[in-house]
Image: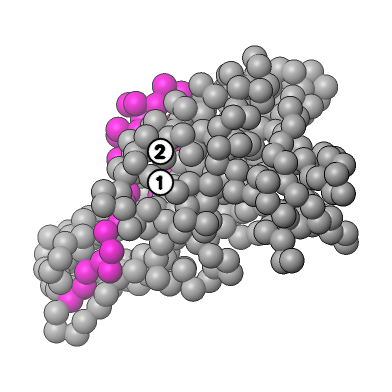
Amino acid sequence: MNGHWVKKKQILALLDHSDYVSGEQIAQKVGLSRTAVNNHISQLLDYGVDIYSVKGKGYKLSNPLPLFDEAKLLAAIDNRCFYFDDINSTNAFMLQHADELKTGDICIAEYQSAGRGRRGRNWVSPYGHHVYASIFWRLNQGMNAAMGLSLIVGCSIVKTLEKYGVENLGLKWPNDIYKDNKKLAGILIELSGHSLDECNLVIGFGINMSMSNKHAEAIDQPWSDLSALAEMPNKTDLMIDLHQQLKSDLRLFELQGLTPFIPQWEKHDLFIHKEVDLIMAPHTLSGICRGIDQQGAILLEINGNITSHIGGEISLRASAK
């Protein structure tokens, strides 16, 4: 861990209480000058941490900040686990080191300066508030075998969250997880060095745990997180369990394809048997969603005929009719 993050985490631990802590108290406890404390707090604000500051009282966190337990992660995950307080993108890191990785290796971060979503969208990544991770997977059957993979990852995330008592979860084709009809998590799969015989995949995902007020204002769609739960899942335990679930499901997918997962997808499909608009710019198709096929394509019924559609530029939304 970089030295400046050691001090920042010491400061965060002091602020994670109900009472305000003065700058003088922080300086004494972490062995810094008042100026250095102010600089660290200013930098934490830049990283998206919500910190209340009241003159004459001091500082405190606006909400509890769930951080990973690095030692526990490294001990419990039975693959190489790369943990960062600060990184540009977990996907970018794994793509850069793809030649050195083995199936199941994972990169986990507290903050991403350049987190990416589907179609180049920015993934809001404030420090410590959420889960940001990327798992590496090598498919020996080639890139064609990766069709429908994002659906498997979505099912894995839902299955793991349900073990922690998270309810009202839904899946939006092809790569979003919703809670209470608002986006909770997203998936971004990127290929590296693919060929007909072998395909390297980096499977990135983000899960909203406790959205900061500052970054909530920057999101242009309805979102949800886990902060309203009676007991929010421990982020470290959740990540360990999700890693195991992903490996188990991805191995099953390699052996049997999508077939074992279709019932779970249909159970959580937000749009199945509903009227939808399927947007394939510059065109839009309107019909009734009939689920997915064995390749992960969405099935759309139009005037009694069912056709399948798949592609990186397809999005799905409830019909405006």
Residue hosting label 1: 167
Name the quadrant containing residue 219.
bottom right
Q: Position of residue 114 (x, y in %)?
A: 58, 57
Instruction: Give the numbered dot on residue 162.
Output: 2
Quadrant that contains the C terminus: bottom right
Q: Position of residue 33 (x, y in %)?
A: 20, 69
Looking at the image, tell me whether mark 2 or mark 1 is earlier in sequence order: 2
> How did the renderer colour the structure?
one colour
Label 2, residues with CA under 10 Å away: few <14, some 14-19, many ≥20: few
Q: Is residue 195 visible?
A: yes
Q: Which residue of the protein is positioned furthest toward the bottom in this rendering?
A: 55
Horizontal arrangement in the rendering, residue 125 relative to residue 282 (left or right)? left
How many labels were placed on the picture? 2
Q: Residue at x 21, y 73 (%)?
A: 59
Q: Residue at x 49, y 73 (%)?
A: 217
Q: Residue at x 36, y 65 (%)?
A: 49
Q: Position of residue 125 (x, y in %)?
A: 49, 58
Q: Secondary structure at mark 2?
A: helix
Q: Position of residue 79 (x, y in %)?
A: 46, 23
Horizontal arrangement in the rendering, residue 85 relative to residue 59 (left or right)? right
Extent of the magenta region: 58-87
Q: CA distance from mark 2 to mark 1?
A: 6 Å
